[in-house]
Image (cartoon, rainbow, N blue to C red):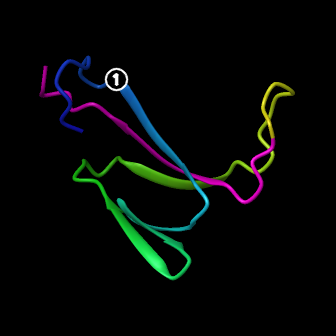
Amino acid sequence: MNWKGLRPGVSVRWAMATDASIAVEGSAAVLTQAGRKLHVAFAAPADLRLESVSIKNPEGEWNADNPGKRMLTAHGRADPTVA
């Protein structure tokens, strides 16, 4: 990932909660809801990992239930060649 200001090689995480269904396809995902689609793509290094996670019943008694919700997450490392 080419984000200036990050220490090279630092772990980076991005996340988005949604009611849509999520289909992960490499470094891209398709979110589908009510017959409409949203395409999410990352121009990133090969180590980027996308994940679709249920957040319906999150851990911890302080977290409320999120019926029908999912989270799209992206995990990667900042580009070690960009300072």
Q: Amino acid at mark 1?
A: Val
Looking at the image, the residue that sits furthest to the bottom is 35
Give the side of residue 21 with respect to residue 44, left or right: right
In the displayed orientation, state which residue is furthest to the left. 82
Question: Is residue 19 a member of the stretch shown in magenta?
Answer: no
Q: Nearer the viewer, residue 62 or 25?
A: 62
| Quadrant where the N terminus is found in the figure | top left
Label 1 secondary element: loop
Residue 59 or 34: which is nearer the viewer? 34
Q: Is residue 46 above or below residue 82?
A: below
Count of labels shown? 1
60 and 44: which is toward the camera: 60
Relative to 60, is 24 above or below? below
Which residue is at the far right? 61
Quadrant for residue 40, please give it. bottom left
Find residue 44 and report its horizontal and vertical position in percent: 24, 49
The quarter of the displayed image where residue 83 is located: top left
Q: Callout 1 environment at 10 Å: few (<14), some (14 to 19), or many (20+)?
A: few
Question: Residue sitting at 67 percent across and 55 percent down?
Answer: 69
Position of residue 77 measured from the top left corner of the image (x, y, whole percent):
33, 33
Give above or below for 4 relative to 53.
Answer: above
**Residue on which the image places disc 1:** 10
- The residue at 81%/43% (across/down) is 65
Please state if 43 lies on the left or on the right of 63 as rendered.
left
Query: Residue at the location (18% across, 36% down)?
Result: 2
Q: Which residues are magenta?
A: 65-83
State the residue at coordinates (35%, 59%).
27
Q: Is residue 73 magenta?
A: yes
Q: Position of residue 62 (x, y in %)?
A: 81, 25
Determine whether, in the image, residue 54 is placed left or right of residue 61.
Answer: left
